[in-house]
Image: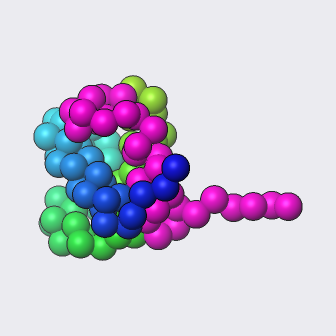
Amino acid sequence: MSISPQSAEAIALQAVAWLVGNDDLLPVFLGATGASEHDLRNQLKDPAFLGAVLDFLLMDDAWVIACAEAQQIAPDRLAIARAALPGGEQTHWT
């Protein structure tokens, strides 16, 4: 199943909103990426940055589930959204 890039960006923006509201996880994201809160605000229109946010969240099943529950979407929608953003294409090795 695939979604449009616009729908993927909407899911990613909601994920950013969830991340910003998570006082425990936001500092982990900022530390892991080297981004500042200023960078976070300024990159919201960059689909590649939104993909990076989803990449971060997809590292932990608990984060995926919590974010998906907050958005009232199925957890796999985050991975589907990631695939629709720049850099999310699956690599085919054969």
Verify whether residue 78 appears in magenta. yes
Image coords of residue 26 (percent x, y): 24, 43
In this view of the protein, which residue sits in the foreground, 49 or 24? 49
Q: Quadrant of residue 18?
A: top left
Range of magenta residues: 65-94
Q: Quadrant of the C terminus?
A: bottom right
Q: Quadrant of residue 53?
A: bottom left
Residue for point 31% across, 66% down? 6
Residue for point 42% across, 57% down? 3
Q: Quadrant of residue 93?
A: bottom right
Residue for point 35% across, 58% down? 8
Question: In screen coordinates, is 26 left or right of 52?
Answer: left
Q: Is residue 12 visible?
A: yes
Residue for point 40% across, 45% down? 78
According to the image, what is the colour scheme of the structure? rainbow
Image coords of residue 29 (percent x, y): 32, 48
